[in-house]
Image (cartoon, helix red, strand yellow):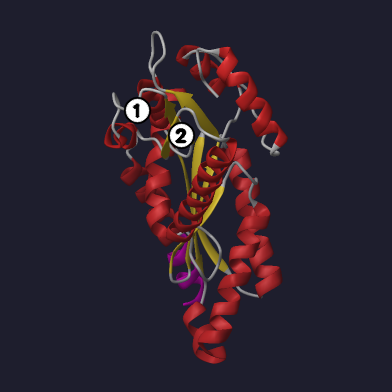
Amino acid sequence: MVDDEEFVSEPIVGMLRHLGFQAESVNNGHDALKALKEKAYTFLLTDIKMPGMNGLELIQQTMDEYPQMSTIAMTGYYKEYSYVDVVNSGASDFINKPFVIEELEAKIRRAIIERDIKQKLRRLSITDSLTGLYNQRHFHTRLGDEVIRAERQNHPLALIFLDLDDFKRYNDTLGHLGGDKLLQKVGGIINANIRQGVDSGYRYGGDEFAVILIDADSDITQTIRKRIETSIREVCNLGVSVGYAQFSHGLSPEDFLTQADKRLYEAKARKTEKKG
């Protein structure tokens, strides 16, 4: 909570804690931004009229840096600020002083529900419903972001492409239901063999999969590649062709992807030649 008047903020923080919320307060916008950098807060309650940075400016900066944050603006000068001004700043809601704690609690809980619904919808929009991995749309977004980060911070970045061998024959033999179960197993294998909270797995399309490896040098890339390949062969009794690439300075996301894709098709071509 941000308010330049402690006699206002202290009792509200106390009441919020009594309701079960973890709440803390500062008395200006600059201290609020500092606090947000030091600790993972999920909700911002701020007065609008404050010396220096006002509440609407604080909300705008907060939403630019922490777009998932829920925010409520409060003021006793409701004639000076319209609801439209508050919403345009990025706030979730607006409350006039003086207010009873029940009104504030209701607005906070409604904002939390709305935030959770948005997060759930966002997860659904970027997730492949069959395998539980991320989908191709999110892959391209994430790859672009990670290439920019690797370029800026000079961190190693790797990309793995996988294509199941003879999946069409498997699908034709056991039917689409059997094929779907196999793809689900592969999704689980990928998730189990990457570093949780670091790497990310994707169903690129059909029986093609991708993995983005963060801060991964060649040794880490090969270790994870071999683990996934071995697990698919042992659990699914199916071969897999793999292509990979290590990011190098100046590569665009498209060129990075092309390198891994090219090596994937080279691996598939070698298997075809052996069969021939």
Label 1: how many residues lie within 10 Å, few (<14), some (14-19) or many (20+)?
some
Circle 2 — which element?
Answer: strand
Name the residue located 43 percent from the left edge and 45 percent from the top edge. Answer: 142
Read off the residue under disc 2: 72
Circle 1 — which element?
Answer: loop
Q: Is residue 189 magenta?
A: no
Q: Which residues are the magenta region?
A: 267-276
Read off the residue under disc 1: 78
Earlier-in-chain disc, 1 versus 2: 2
Name the residue located 53 percent from the left edge and 90 percent from the top edge. Answer: 175
Is residue 166 visible from the viewing direction of this image? yes
Q: Depth check: 47 or 115 in front?
A: 47
Residue 20 lies, in percent from the top left, at: 71, 39
Q: For the residue marked with disc 2, what is the amino acid? A: Ile
Name the residue located 71 percent from the left edge and 69 percent from the top edge. Answer: 234
- Above or below, comparing residue 34 to residue 230 in the picture: above
- Relative horizontal placement of residue 12, taking residue 160 as reference (left or right): right
Q: Quadrant of residue 204?
A: bottom left
Q: Depth check: 22 or 103 in front?
A: 103
Residue 21 lies, in percent from the top left, at: 67, 36
Specify the principal SS of the magenta part: helix
